[in-house]
């Protein structure tokens, strides 16, 4: 259990880096940055499958699962998120996506765990989320109209995609214990890389436009770093957590992504968190500890 918890927290630390990557590459659109990250993930995974002797290739059924889950957890999830931010702004989609740990906890509860044991961690997470929402929305003008509600729909669909990915991915790994966490990450990576190509063809910038970017070298390095670190390595670690822990505890550990993302943002901006933000972080941390205790 300790290995799974540490792996889940480490995955959250790596995922948190993705939130500051766009600020380091202001010349790239969200879609272009995502495509670069996922192409790096796919290329790295494919190279490992070719070079590592112990690596195996999936059967047709396994490949279908890898493609389906890569769409849910990577391509469709992020594309829907980008569309939601375009139509509804940043704050409301962030709130909707922030409920993923709650849904994972509710839908992934082990049969032997009483609701009373899950309730403290759930309430602490909801309180922390409420404080973060209050902090984010203070003084912010929320858009309205048909575009806004379409954006809300996109955000809800994005949230459903990743929640389904988290639950189905954990269930698949538990049914196939002979498949290692790294092998499954590689199969997902190849499928995700192919999906990234499709996303680039549909919504990405022209190659000439990308190559004309002033800091294209830095952008490429960040895409590679987030592709190998925040995608491949994070997926390996998340698979380890999913194999060893219940889906409800994994869902609680997703909160660590928010904690690390806030920490990186504070460091990047060279500023201290507000009282609301600091209080929310304390509640998130307490929620994780309460959930770990309940799942012992």
Image (cartoon, rainbow, N blue to C red):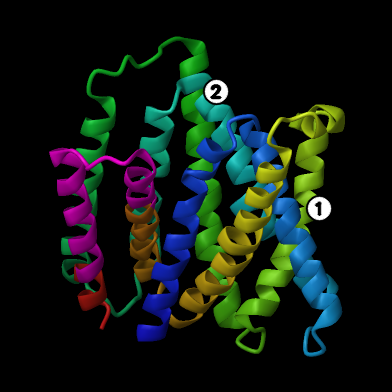
Q: Quadrant of the C terminus?
A: bottom left
Which residue does the image show at 58% across and 77% down from the upper left? 173
Task: Specify whether 102 is left or right of 86.
Answer: left
Q: What residue range appears in magenta?
A: 261-289
Q: Is residue 146 above or below residue 215?
A: above
SS under mark 2: helix
Q: Disc 1 marks which residue?
A: 194
Residue placed most toward the observer, 45 or 158 = 45
Circle 1/circle 2 CB separation < 8 Å: no
Instruction: Examine the rendering and report whether any part of residue 47 can be seen.
Output: yes
Instruction: Give the class, few, some or many, for how many residues have Cα within 10 Å of label 2's Cα (few <14, many ≥20).
Output: some
* Label drawn at residue 86: 2
Q: Quadrant of the N terminus?
A: bottom left
Which residue does the image show at 60% across and 87% down from the upper left? 177
Residue 283 screen position, x and y as percent: 17, 54
Give yes or no for residue 263 being in the magenta stretch: yes
Q: Earlier in the sequence, mark 1 or mark 2?
A: 2
Residue 243 screen position, x and y as percent: 51, 80
Q: Is residue 265 above or below residue 49?
A: above
Which residue does the image show at 59% across and 69% down from the upper left? 233
Instruction: Give the class, few, some or many, for how many residues have Cα within 10 Å of label 1's Cα (few <14, many ≥20).
Output: some
Residue placed most toward the observer, 142 or 208 = 208
């Amino acid at each position: 259990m300790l290995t799974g918890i540490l792996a889940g927290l480490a995955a959250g630390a790596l995922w948190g880096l993705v939130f500051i990557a766009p600020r380091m590459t202001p010349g790239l659109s969200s879609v272009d940055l995502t495509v670069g990250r996922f192409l790096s993930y796919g290329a790295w995974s494919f190279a490992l499958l070719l070079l590592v002797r112990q690596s195996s290739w999936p059967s047709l059924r396994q490949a279908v699962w890898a493609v389906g889950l890569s769409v849910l957890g990577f391509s469709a999830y992020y594309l829907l998120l980008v569309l939601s931010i375009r139509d509804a702004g940043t704050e409301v989609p962030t709130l909707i996506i922030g409920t993923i740990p709650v849904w994972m906890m509710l839908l992934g509860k082990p049969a032997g765990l009483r609701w009373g044991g899950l309730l403290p961690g759930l309430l602490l997470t909801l309180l922390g989320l409420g404080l973060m929402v209050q902090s984010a929305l203070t003084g912010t003008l929320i858009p309205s109209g048909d575009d806004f509600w379409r954006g809300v729909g996109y955000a809800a669909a994005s949230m459903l995609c990743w929640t389904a990915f988290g639950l189905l991915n954990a269930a698949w790994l538990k049914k196939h214990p002979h498949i290692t966490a790294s092998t499954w990450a590689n199969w997902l990576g190849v499928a995700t890389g192919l999906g990234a190509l499709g996303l680039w063809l549909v919504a990405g910038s022209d190659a000439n436009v990308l190559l004309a970017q002033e800091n294209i070298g830095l952008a490429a390095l960040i895409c590679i770093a987030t592709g190998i670190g925040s995608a491949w390595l994070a997926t390996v670690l998340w698979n380890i957590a999913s194999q060893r822990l219940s889906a409800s505890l994994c869902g609680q550990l997703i909160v660590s992504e928010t904690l690390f993302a806030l920490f990186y943002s504070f460091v990047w901006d060279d500023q201290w968190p507000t009282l609301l933000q600091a209080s929310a972080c304390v509640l998130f941390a307490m929620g994780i500890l309460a959930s770990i205790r309940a799942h012992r």
